[in-house]
Image: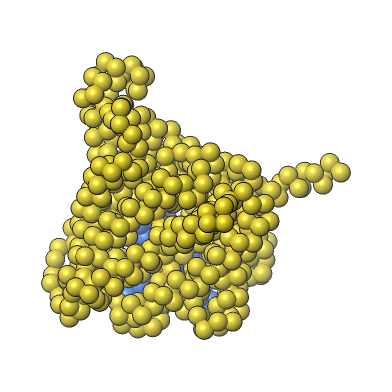
């Protein structure tokens, strides 16, 4: 699984989200690659889940990946709940097809 | 002997030193061999990509400078671009007198000192903003190097100042951060702190905290400024066109196309330079991204082992969701402030930093949020305005008096530092050094 975090520069907020998500995944025992993306170049890239701040919603309308929008970027509980929901629905979808 | 010389020459290269830092960090985190290899290589490539971007950026910038010079020939007006990543990237890539290596070592030892200070003082903050870790290491290394110190003493002194900066600045901002975020969970880790605190202080003086700018609903239509490609293109198009028109008014189109654009149509040439500059910035930022993507998780891993429960000091956008209206107020007031400051600087004959949407959005935005936290709506307007207004003078001062030495000789022509947390301590240390006749 490939999870992308998005911000304007691709190394500030997205990096922070990546660090938070790495911790969450480690605690949950989930294996995934987490990559920070920037607004300028993300359109050519692939991921299963994209995590970004709420105000990036308009930039993510055309994306095929599952989008997780975070209201409060430093609320680890919110990030964890929303991310795990997305991972769960992604894996149930995969098992439906399998 | 040959192999020894080869290794010695290799580990003096900034790219290799940073690669080694990543490698050690990844090994300490017990990553698999494949991850260690790719992380190390990506760090090395990051620095090389950066130098490609720097080359493109400077190549596009020089003709724009020439236009301003042609336009203001006979006067002493100088302009420059204020862009921290550009300065440190250019100087580290050029590696004049092994200053690039000193920057890389300062990044490592400065961070170790930061971790030790956080461990043994009450200031339990862990600085995690990657590009700021790099920029401050770069700024302080360049500062001490410019005093003519040996590489050893440059790294020692720069690391001490850098470690102190990363530990104490988040502590300074924390009282206001508590007001902004309504919790004590995160700290502020960005080079804007000193001017943000000025904004908070002025906000407290002139405003009312309860009259918050966040109580009104305003449209968030200016959010596209977050996209570097768009904001830098727009601002550089305006700057380059203004420069071209000023030059043409002075020398005429034929002379412009002969001496500046090399025979190319003036308008096409001008647009190309503006977009070429943006392309250079985007390549540079891609390099920065690869450079810090491996180092930051490694630093975080080590830091959390040594200082359990430390508050992470994070990049400025973490506070934006708490005050989106103030952010927009900052963008508007910061842009106005830049124009006003540019006019005054030009009139008194100081070097003029060209407009920067990055500073208006990210810096004045944060300044307005700090101002709003202590002084409400009035504080937000004053904070956003003051950040860029005072900031432009500080930036111009450092460029005019070469506080960080002759940046052009070190490889960064027509570029200057932006972040006050590097410049203001830099000016203090520079002034003390001057007193002792350095």
Colouring method of the image: by chain
Q: Quadrant of residue B107?
A: bottom right
Q: Is residue B211 above or below residue B417?
A: below
Q: Position of residue B54 (x, y in %)?
A: 47, 41
Task: Look at 64% across and 52% down and name the residue there.
Answer: B149
Give B145 or A93, whichever is nearer the viewer: B145
What percent of the width, then of the height, locates residue B136? Answer: 50, 59
Whether residue B270 appears in this view of the structure is no
Front residue of B241 and B430: B430
The residue drawn where x is 44% and y is 73% is B170
Is residue B96 left or right of B278 when viewed as pictured?
A: right
Looking at the rendered structure, the number of numbered marks drawn on it comes to 0
Say which quarter of the image contains residue B302. bottom right
In this view of the protein, which residue sits in the foreground, B80 or A61? B80
Q: Is residue B239 above or below residue B382?
A: above
Query: Percent from the top left, x then y, of residue B266?
Result: 27, 23
**Residue drawn at point x = 61 percent, y = 79 percent:** B306
Residue B139 falls left or right of residue A50: right
Q: Is residue B5 visible?
A: yes
Q: Nearer the viewer, residue B219 or B157?
A: B157
For the N terminus of chain B, which image quadrant? top right
Rendering coords of residue B79 (x, y %)? 34, 39
- Chain letter, blue in picture: A
Q: Chain B is which colour? A: yellow
Q: Is residue B378 above or below residue B19?
A: below
Seen at 35% across and 72% down, the residue is A73
Q: Is residue B10 left or right of residue B212?
A: right
């Amino acid at each position: 699984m490939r999870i992308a975090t998005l911000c304007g520069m691709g190394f500030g907020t997205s990096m922070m989200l990546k660090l938070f998500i790495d911790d969450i995944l480690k605690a949950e025992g989930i294996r995934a690659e987490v990559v920070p993306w920037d607004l300028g170049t993300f359109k050519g890239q692939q991921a299963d889940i994209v995590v970004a701040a709420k105000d990036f919603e308009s930039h993510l309308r055309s994306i095929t990946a599952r989008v997780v929008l975070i209201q409060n970027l430093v609320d680890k509980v919110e990030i964890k709940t929303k991310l795990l929901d997305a991972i769960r629905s992604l894996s149930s979808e995969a098992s439906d097809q399998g | 002997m040959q192999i020894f010389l080869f290794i010695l020459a290799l580990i003096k290269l900034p790219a290799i030193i940073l690669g080694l830092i990543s490698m050690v960090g990844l090994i300490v985190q017990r990553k698999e061999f494949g991850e260690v290899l790719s992380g190390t290589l990506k760090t090395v490539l990051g620095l090389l990509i950066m130098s490609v971007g720097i080359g493109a950026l400077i190549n596009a910038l020089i003709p724009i400078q020439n236009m301003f010079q042609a336009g203001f020939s006979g006067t002493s007006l100088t302009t420059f671009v204020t862009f921290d990543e550009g300065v440190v990237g250019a100087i580290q890539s050029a590696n004049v007198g092994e200053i690039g290596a000193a920057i890389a070592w300062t990044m490592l030892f400065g961070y170790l000192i930061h971790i030790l200070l956080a461990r043994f003082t009450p200031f339990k903050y862990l600085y995690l903003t990657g590009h700021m870790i790099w920029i401050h290491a770069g700024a302080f290394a360049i500062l001490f190097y410019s005093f003519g110190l040996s590489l050893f003493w440059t790294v020692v002194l720069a690391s001490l100042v850098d470690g102190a900066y990363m530990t104490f600045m988040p502590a300074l901002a924390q009282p206001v951060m508590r007001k902004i975020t309504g919790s004590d969970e995160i700290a502020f880790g960005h080079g804007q702190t000193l001017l943000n605190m000025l904004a908070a202080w002025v906000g407290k003086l002139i405003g009312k905290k309860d009259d918050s700018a966040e109580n009104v609903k305003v449209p968030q239509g200016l959010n596209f400024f977050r996209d570097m490609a768009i904001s830098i293109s727009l601002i550089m198009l305006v700057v380059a066109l203004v420069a071209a028109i000023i030059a043409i008014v002075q020398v005429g189109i034929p002379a412009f196309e002969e001496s500046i654009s090399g025979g190319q149509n003036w308008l096409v040439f001008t647009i190309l330079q503006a977009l070429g500059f943006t392309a250079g910035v985007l390549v540079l930022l891609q390099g920065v991204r690869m450079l810090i993507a491996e180092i930051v998780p490694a630093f975080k891993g080590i830091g959390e082992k040594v200082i359990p429960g430390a508050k992470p000091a994070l990049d400025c956008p973490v506070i934006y969701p708490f005050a989106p209206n103030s952010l927009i107020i900052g963008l508007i007031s910061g842009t106005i402030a830049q124009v006003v400051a540019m006019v005054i600087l030009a009139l008194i004959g100081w070097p003029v930093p060209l407009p920067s949407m990055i500073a208006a959005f990210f810096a004045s935005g944060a300044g307005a949020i700090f101002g709003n936290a202590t002084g409400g709506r009035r504080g937000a307007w004053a904070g956003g305005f003051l950040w860029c207004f005072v900031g432009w003078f500080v930036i111009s001062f450092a460029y005019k008096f070469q506080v960080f030495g002759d940046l052009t000789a070190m490889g960064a022509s027509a570029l200057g530092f932006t972040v006050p947390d590097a410049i203001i301590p830099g000016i203090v240390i520079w002034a003390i050094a001057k007193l002792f006749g350095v």
